Image: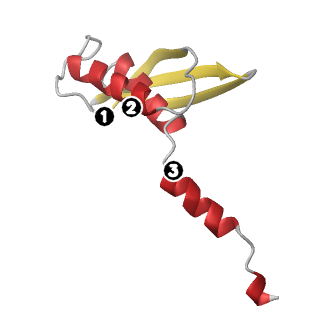
Amino acid sequence: MCLESEPENDHGCCRLHMLVAREYAQGTIPKIYVRRVGMQHYDTLYAVWMERNGKRIADCIEACCGTDAKATFVGKHFIVDESEAELNRMYALEDKRRK
């Protein structure tokens, strides 16, 4: 979340969050759209979406500004933890001892 509390302003910490998210993202990131849809507790609720391979990926995210919402969206849909992928692959392997 943001270190500054003014909503709808350009926050330096949110720009840094976006730079870090883009740095660690896997693959090319298409254009991401964001629209403010309401208030949720202390943050604003944003609708964030993108078009990828003819399909729309969308999410509702609580954030302090649109930049932070986009960065959170990138982190959620593009940053892949390689160790988690390896664990999923290991659990998916068939155990031949039980046959």
| Kind of residue at badge 2 | Glu
Q: Residue at x 57, y 58 (%)?
A: 86
Q: Residue at x 71, y 69 (%)?
A: 93
Q: Which residue is mark 3?
A: 82
**Within 10 Å of the Cα at label 2, are there few (<14), some (14-19), or many (20+) other Cα atoms?**
many
Tell me whether the residue at label 1 lies in contact with that at label 2, contact meaning CB atoms closer than 8 angstroms: yes
Q: Is residue 69 left or right of residue 98?
A: left
Relative depth, front residue between 60 and 75: 75
C-alpha separation, residue under disc 2 versus residue under disc 3: 26 Å
Residue 82, placed above or below residue 63: below
Q: How is the image coloured?
A: secondary structure
| Kind of residue at badge 3 | Glu
Label ID, residue 62: 2
| Kind of residue at badge 1 | His
Upstream in the sequence, badge 1 or badge 2?
Answer: 1
Upstream in the sequence, badge 2 or badge 3?
Answer: 2
Q: Which residue is mark 1?
A: 41
Q: Could you say where residue 8 lies in the image, as x and y percent from the top left?
A: 29, 12
